[in-house]
Amino acid sequence: MIPQSFVQELLSRVDIVDVIERYLPLKKSGANYFACCPFHGEKSASFSVSPSKQFYHCFGCGVHGSAIGFLMEYSGLGFVDAVKELAAQTGLQVPDDGRSASPTQGDASERLYEAMAIAARFYREQLKPARQAIDYLKRRGLSGEVAARFGLGYAPDDWQALQKVFPDYQVKTLANAGLVIDNDQGRRYDRFRNRIIFPIHDRRGRIIAFGGRVLDKGEPKYLNSPETPLFEKGRELYGLFLAQKAIRDAGFAVVVEGYMDVVALAQFGIENAVATLGTATTPQHVHTLLRQSDRVVFCFDGDAAGRRAAWRALENALESLRDDATLAFLFLPAEHDPDSFVRAEGADAFRKAAGSATPLARFLIQELADRHPLDSAEGRAAFVHEAAPLVIRIGAPLLRLQVIKAVAEASGLTQAELEQALAQLAPHQPRRRGAADAAAPTGASHEPPPPTATERARRAVRPSVQRPRLQGRRKPPSTAGTLLRLVLQHPTWAARLPVSLIPDDSPEGLALIAIIDMLSLGEPVPAGGLGALIERFRDTPHGETLARVAAELVDAEFDEAVVETLFDDSLRKLHADSVSNEIAALLQRDREQGLDSAHRHRLSELLLEKRNLASGGKVSDL
C-alpha cells in the first residue's frame, strides 16, 4: 500500500498541466487549458485542465480527475502504477506503508523485470553479428530504424546462450520469467534458439515476454513466452505500448495476427497496429482497445481461416460493444496478408481499405446469411436460431436494437415476432464455444468479467462516463450541496462549519461531514489543489460525490466577489432549517403528550432565535 501522505506530497509537487501536456497539446484559454478529449472522438476542444484546481474535466463525455486519475485513464494503469509513474517523472521514491499482502512480491516482480531487460539487451546485441538474421529481416523489407524501434533481436542457435549474461544460470528467476526450460532429466536450456526475437511490452513499456520467429522453415513458426507472473497472453497486445499515440492520432486501432504484420505496417508509416499473441481475440483485448479508441478494425486474411478468426473476434466482442464505438472487419484479398498487401499496394491503399472495413453488425448478418440461405423457410428459421444467442449478448442497447431490426428484415419477420422468438430461443441456446472459452467449464457464465480492484477504485473516483451524454438542466443544489461546492472552492472553510448542523440525509451532506472530520482530526487541507482533495477520498463512499461536484465547479465556479456572502447565507439557512426542524418536533410532542417546563423554555428560545434569523441576524456560535 502507498501511504496517503505520500500521495498528497506527490500531488503537491506536480503541476497537472505539465503532466497532461506530455501526452496532449494544450492551448491556454482564460484561466484554463484546453485540448480535444483523448477519451472520446470530438473535433472541438472540450477537455479542460485547471491549473488552480489541479483537476481536469471534459465537458463532452464527463471524464474528470487528478493527475493520477489522468494517467490511470490515459495509459490504462492501475492506481499504484500511476502513482509510481508520476513519482518517477518527479524524481520521488515511492515508499510502502508495510501493509502489502506480500512484502516479497514486489522484489520478486522486480527481479523478473530485470531478467527480461537483461535478456532483451543480450538478444539485441546478438542481432548485428548474426548475418543470417540480418539477411532475413532485409528480405522482409525492414530497415534498421524500424528494427531498433521495436527492439528486435536474435536468439543464437545455442542451447545455453543466456548463460553468458546470467552467470547463475540455474537461478529460479529465469524459469519464472519463461526464459529457460527445465526438462525431465533436470537439464536446463534456453527457450528461444535461432529465432528473431520480438520483445513484448506492457503499457508502461516494460518487457514482460518475448516472441520468437523462425528464420526460414521450422515449427512452430512463432513461439511465445509461456504465461508468467508478468505475462498473460489473453490480456496483452503486441505493439500497444508503441502504438498508443498513433492510435489516438489516426482515430482508430488496427488489430492484425502476427508480429511481422505490426512491424511491416510500421515500416510503411502505419503505426497504429497491434497484434494478438497467439490467441483468438479475447474480451479483455476488446476492453483494452476500446479504452484507446472508439474505432477498432480487425484485419484478417480473406481465406476461410481468416474468416473463422474474425468470427471468434466478433463473438468475444459482443458484451463489450458500446453505442459510441465501432468495431469493423477488414478482409484482405486471399493472396495477401497485411505485410504483403502494404508492400504491393502501399500505405494509402491499406488506410483506405481500413476506412471502409465492414462494421461488426453487417458482418454478423452477412456471415449468418451465408451459412443459412434465406430463400427457404428452413434457412430463415436456422438463420434466426443462430442469431438469437448472439443478439442478446450485444452490450450496446441501440446497436442491439438495430441488429434485431436487421435480423427481422432478413428473416421476413416483424420486429415484434422476432423479439418474441428471441425470448423463446435465447434462454435455451448456449453460445458456441470458441477458443477463448476452451478452458471454461461447460455452462460457465458468459457475462463480462467482474471489475478488478483497480477498476473498482477508479469507479469510486468518478462515475462511468466513457460515452458522451446529454447536458440537461441541473437540479438546484440543496443547502448542504451549496456548502460542499463552496468548501471545494475554499477547503479551509470547512473548519468554520458546525458538524452538528450538517444534514446526513444526502451524499453531499455526508461528503461535507467527511471533510469536516478530516480537519477536526488535525489532518491538513491537501496542498495539491482540488485534485489532491479528490485523491484523499479515493476508494471511499464519498469519492464519487466529490469528483462529480468538483467537475461541476470546473463548469460553473462561484464568483469570488460573492462567495463569502453566499457561505454566510448558506450557513444561516442551515441554522434556520435546524431551528425549524427542532420547533416542529417540539410542537408535535406538545400535540401528542404535552411539554414540561424545560421543553417549553426551549421552544421559546427557538422561536426567538427563528425571528432573529428571519430578520437577518448573524448565526450564533454553536
Image (cartoon, rainbow, N blue to C red):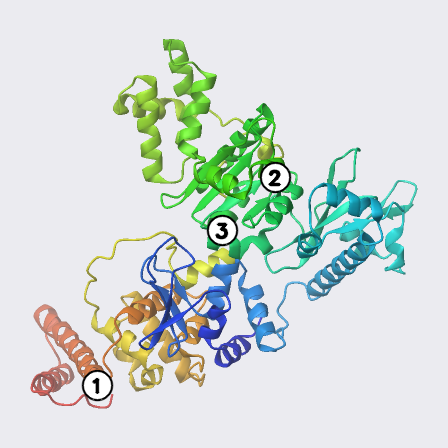
Q: Residue at x 17, y 82 (%)?
A: 569
Residue 151 appears in which quarter of the rendering?
Answer: bottom right
Asked if one can make out residue 236 in the rendered structure from this viewpoint, the answer is no
Q: Nearer the viewer, residue 492 or 167?
A: 167
Of marks 2 and 3, which one's residue comes earlier in the chain? 2
Give the labeled residue for mark 1: 561
Q: Nearer the viewer, residue 621 or 68?
A: 68
SS assignment at label 2: helix
Which one is closest to the eye, mark 3 or mark 1? 1
Query: On residue 321, which mark appears?
Result: none
Note whether 596 is above or below 387 in the view shown.
below
Give the labeled residue for mark 3: 451
Distance of mark 3 from mark 1, alpha carbons?
A: 45 Å
SS assignment at label 3: loop
Of marks 3 and 1, which one's residue comes earlier in the chain? 3
Q: Residue 386: x and y, percent?
A: 44, 22
